[in-house]
Image (tube, rainbow, N blue to C red):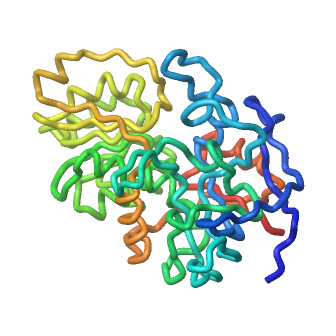
């Protein structure tokens, strides 16, 4: 296969609004030893794309500092953490068997080579991502999904959303028979949590808006709680004994109000702050009940391996809300930012 020297890509050249995101011709990345070159067939959007463009992550020293996912990033940067595509070239002879394979990339950059390593960087932030016709990735982070029953669009939705969801569940020790509360249930991570927790045998209480109730139920929620009304009262009504685990991408007031809903030795897992990051809560509800408040950032290599196994078996069924061409990336991110959709939004880089 002849690989061109240039490609179309969506690039940010600074932090800011949509004006800093430009679709243009750039060089096709050269594949290095230990890497593969992937022709991108689908790239999924995430909130991380919006917040990286905006520089909204702050720093430990200054929560208002302009920052990428884990600190200052180098510009220009091709956005996009989630990729499904085909391997078209390899940097090392021992990886030639991957050429032609349909693959998904684990977008995390880890702190060690351990199977339980922590993510300290992300494709689309700390290295170039998949809003492009081609992307490189370390061979160790590429998973052969040729025989998976999911479409390319569905495969592209898995890495960040479902990886984050599975990381939350593993760190929260979700087990069959437990009652879990899922916030933001109509979003990418939220729907992933609903599907994965239901598949594990948990009872799922999902928080969403009334207009999205049916879609969240179809994803597997046992009960859908309307976020427009008191979540505490609704949980008391459907789970009077309380919940075992909160799986929360919202935080804000929900974290304050939700901690008292936990049973003894319950866990509250936070992986987002859509409702606000500056949270005040009654710490007595934490220590008097042996509760645990757990931060969860994406997944480990072990979690991601498990996710790929689940995808190969058809245990997950990602919902695609909309697909856009790469040239319409502004419209795609605007749709994501409005949050009126259910499921995931994807980009198609090729005409």
In the foreground, 186 or 249: 249
312 versus 161 height, above or below: below
Direction from residue 99 to residue 190 in the image, left or right: left
Q: In the image, residue 10 lies at what x, y percent?
A: 79, 50
Q: In the image, residue 281 lies at what x, y percent?
A: 30, 17
Q: In the image, residue 277 lies at what x, y percent?
A: 46, 23
Direction from residue 39 to residue 152 in the image, left or right: left
Q: Residue at x 68, y 31 (%)?
A: 54
- Pick the quarter of the image with the C terminus: bottom right
Q: In the image, residue 6 lies at what x, y percent?
A: 87, 63
Q: Residue at x 56, y 24 (%)?
A: 58
Q: Residue at x 18, y 51 (%)?
A: 178
In the rendered image, is residue 145 in sight?
A: yes
- Pick the quarter of the image with the N terminus: bottom right
In the foreground, 179 or 112: 112
Within the image, what quadrant is residue 217 found in?
bottom left
Q: Residue at x 32, y 22 (%)?
A: 256
Within the image, what quadrant is residue 39 found in?
bottom right
In the foreground, 342 or 176: 176
160 versus 62 height, above or below: below
In the rendered image, is residue 185 in sight?
A: no
């Amino acid at each position: 296969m002849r690989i061109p020297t240039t490609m179309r890509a969506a690039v940010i050249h600074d932090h800011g609004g949509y004006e800093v995101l430009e679709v243009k011709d750039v060089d096709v990345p050269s594949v290095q030893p230990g890497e593969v070159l992937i022709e991108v067939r689908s790239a999924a959007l995430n909130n991380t794309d919006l917040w990286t463009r905006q520089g909204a992550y702050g720093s430990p020293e200054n929560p208002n500092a302009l920052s990428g996912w884990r600190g200052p990033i180098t510009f220009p940067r091709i956005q996009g953490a989630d990729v499904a595509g085909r391997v078209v070239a390899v940097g090392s002879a021992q990886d030639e068997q991957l050429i032609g394979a349909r693959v998904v990339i684990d977008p995390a950059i880890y702190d060690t080579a351990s199977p339980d390593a922590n993510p300290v960087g992300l494709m689309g932030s700390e290295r170039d991502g998949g809003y492009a016709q081609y992307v490189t990735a370390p061979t160790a982070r590429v998973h052969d999904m040729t025989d998976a029953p999911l479409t390319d669009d569905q495969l592209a939705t898995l890495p960040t959303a479902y990886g984050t969801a599975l990381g939350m569940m593993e760190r929260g020790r979700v087990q069959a028979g437990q009652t879990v509360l899922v916030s933001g249930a109509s979003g990418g991570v939220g729907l992933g949590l609903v599907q994965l927790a239901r598949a594990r045998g948990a009872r799922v209480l999902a928080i969403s808006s009334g207009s999205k109730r049916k879609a969240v139920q179809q994803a597997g929620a046992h009960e859908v709680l309307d976020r427009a009304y008191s979540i505490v009262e609704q949980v008391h009504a459907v789970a009077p004994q309380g919940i075992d685990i909160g799986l929360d991408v919202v935080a804000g007031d929900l974290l304050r109000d939700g901690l008292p809903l936990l049973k003894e030795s319950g866990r509250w897992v936070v992986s987002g702050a859509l409702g606000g990051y500056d949270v005040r809560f009654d710490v007595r509800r934490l220590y008097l009940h042996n509760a645990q408040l757990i931060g969860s950032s994406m997944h480990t290599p072990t979690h991601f391996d498990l996710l790929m196994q689940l995808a190969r078996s058809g245990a997950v069924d990602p919902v695609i809300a909309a697909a856009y061409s790469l040239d319409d990336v502004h419209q795609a991110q605007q749709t994501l930012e409005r949050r009126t959709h259910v499921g995931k939004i994807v980009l198609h880089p090729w005409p």
